[in-house]
Amino acid sequence: MKIKFTLLLFSILTLASCAEKAIKVEVSNPTDNERKNEIISLFWSDISVQLLLNDSDELIILDEAGAQIPYQLIFNEQSKAQEIIFSTSLLGSQKKTYEIKKGSPEYFKILTHGRAVPERKDDFAWENDRIAFRMYGPALAAENASNGVDIWLKRTEELVLEKFYSDELKNGISYHEDHGLGLDCYKVARTLGAGGIAPFVNDTLWVGRNYTSATLIDQGPLRTSFRLVYESAELGNKTYTQTLTVSLDAGSQMNKAIVSYDGDFEFLPIAAGIWLHKELGIINYDIDKKYIAYAENAVSDAGIHSGRNYVGLVFTNPLSEICQHSEHILGLSRYKKGREFTYYFGSGWSKWGFETDQEWFDYVEKFSQDIEMPLQVQIIK
């Protein structure tokens, strides 16, 4: 009887210990800058092993006040999760501790979205709670579309892409006019638009054409990522293939872009850039800090001024030059075959979030500083 009681007590204590198991994660800001709505990433394997998770188990993440916060599992085209991400905000030099454990997660609003849009000539469009973008697909090939980036300005945290497309295609309500949520008043034409990238060879910017295939990689409340492939892109009398992987996090104005090229070369001069349009705006850049920021008038198709439109580029690789060329402001670098080239592109609007040009310039400069000094993450229990 005593042995049975001891075994029963041991089993109860073991089960209780497993049920109460939790992981403490400390996030610290190594800079004096305030960091707002930044995404933290942890390897899913580290979490699942320490919490002894089964496939059916659910998780919760708690902040220091004990309140649940949203998170997202990142699969990166794998059958099992590869990462878990969540958002944090920190003052300069501040630390915060989060707790991860089994539990029933609350519902949180979805803040990112993206998809191919076959009903609108194969656009690929994506957005978060701050801004929206699109790039052009195969159905626009006959119209000489480029691999440039288009911007949809918005002034709401709500997701607007589905409404904008539905209103345009079904109800005849143009998204080129502002009906209270935002609009598309940005012109791309045969250019890089708001942050595209292309080879820059023999003093020529080889702007590409529409993408040939699109793959949605991850989509959730905090991050949407996808891949666009551009086959048989022209470079003089030769061709190359460009692969562009883009991710957009909730709360950010900036996309992360990872580009690779395949072709008959070892090194390839490349340029990411911003089209300057006919009415030149204000350019702000720093080659040492590796950023370019641009401000210009936003004008609708009807010629109605809609405030100021902002575009930014931030680079992680050294730049050989920042220059004006072919009606663009360009950041020049060099790509080595077999590697990846990472940069960031994004946009903002004077009618939501950035009242002055200087506020946008400050945002882009600060973003360039922040990616050089990422938040530090440590599992402490």
Image (tube, helix red, strand yellow):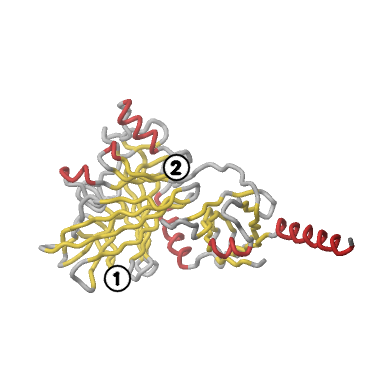
- The residue that mark 1 highlights is 338
User: Taking the image as drawn, is residue 251 in sight?
Assistant: no
Q: Is residue 240 above or below residue 338?
A: above
Q: Quadrant of the N terminus?
A: bottom right
Q: Is residue 373 above or below residue 221?
A: below
Residue in front for this viewpoint, 278 or 105: 105
Residue in front for this viewpoint, 277 or 236: 236
Q: Quadrant of residue 86?
A: bottom right
Location of residue 335 in the rendering, given as x and y in whole percent from the top left corner: 28, 69
In the displayed structure, does residue 140 sit left or right of residue 15? left
Q: Quadrant of the C terminus?
A: bottom right
The three-letter code of the residue at mark 1 reads: Gly
Location of residue 36 in the rendering, given as x and y in whole percent from the top left corner: 53, 54
Disc 1, SS: loop
- The residue that mark 2 highlights is 352
In the displayed structure, does residue 40 sit left or right of residue 334? right
